[in-house]
Amino acid sequence: MRKHTKIVGALAAASALVAGYASAEIEGEVHVGYSSSYEFRFVDLGSDLIEAGADISYDWSDIGLNLSAGAWYGSVNDSGNAFIATPSGAVLGNHDFNELDLYAAVSKELGPVTLELGYIYYAYPDSLTSSDTQEWYVGASYHLPWDLVLSGTFYYDFDENNGWYLQPELSKSFKFNDCLALNLSTGVGFADGMQSQAQAGRINPFSSADGFQGWYIKAELPWEFREHVTIAPYLKYADADSNLAGDINSIEGGQDHLIGGVKLTVGF
């Protein structure tokens, strides 16, 4: 999945409450993209990810809040993400994997600190099991000297997985001109009780890989070649911990992934 900032229902309600206020601002974007693989929390979920999504945000400046919501849809090939453990121990796979995410959030800036509270619903229409799930998350970011940004997001799955995931990140953006920038980021992951983070060698029966999950580094080059139209190629390297099954089609641990992709965004 991509970065969340988002809820349609809450956003619509807030828009109705403050309609007519000059201080309110609504912005949105639609986007499509391609990645060589779908890497999510250091696990390769399949190859040739095709994605599309839409986001909208409402700046309720009277009380200093930003409300946002969105939807994301992704489809990959060669994935064993939809599987079921039978009484005989066999694992049946469906190698067409599609995912729909619905998400929403409210955020507030407090000087150099931005706080965010959000919700995500994950739906898997092709899964052989009832694997749809939900998460709450809370995030914070802090602007450091030299234009560095330190952030962290804590996700709690209160549904299918019943565990938590934590991702701290350090990022910096180099702006070459009004149209072109280079965004660099690096981070790590930690988890506990998340069955989607399967322990290496023990996908069946499920056993979560708790603790350190891995580290990553990412470079993105967004270019706004027309007003409100941006194309952003990116390259990401993710190295999974040896205790984590880093490929959905394998129970081996410690796998690394090099992912390349591009995203086209149109804002409004």
Image (spheres, rainbow, N blue to C red):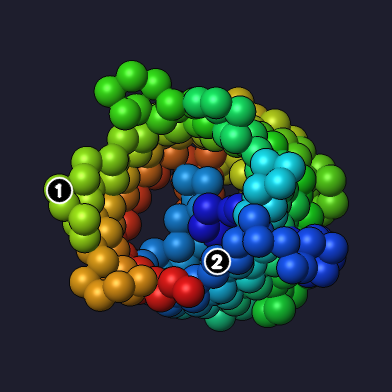
Judge whether 149 appears above or below 82 on screen: above
Name the foreground residue: 69 vs 51: 69
- Residue visible at 55% across and 59% down in the picture: 1
Direction left: furthest residue? 176
Q: Looking at the picture, which amino acid does disc 2 mark?
A: Glu
Decide if residue 26 is in sight here.
yes
- How many residues crowd around disc 2 within 10 Å: few (fewer than 14), some, or many (20 or more)? few
Q: Secondary structure at mark 2?
A: strand
Q: Where residue 34 appears, x then y in whole percent? A: 36, 73
Q: Looking at the picture, which amino acid does disc 1 mark?
A: Phe
Name the foreground residue: 105 vs 253: 105
Q: Which mark is residue 42?
A: none
Q: Which mark is residue 176?
A: 1
- How many residues crowd around disc 1 within 10 Å: few (fewer than 14), some, or many (20 or more)? few
Q: CA distance from mark 2 to mark 1?
A: 25 Å
Q: Where residue 180 appears, x then y in whole percent? A: 19, 56
- Residue visible at 31% across and 49% down in the picture: 236
According to the image, label 2 marks what residue?
27
Decide if residue 93 is in sight here.
no
- Residue visible at 63% across and 70% down in the picture: 71
Q: Where residue 108 appears, x then y in whole percent? A: 65, 38
Direction top: furthest residue? 145
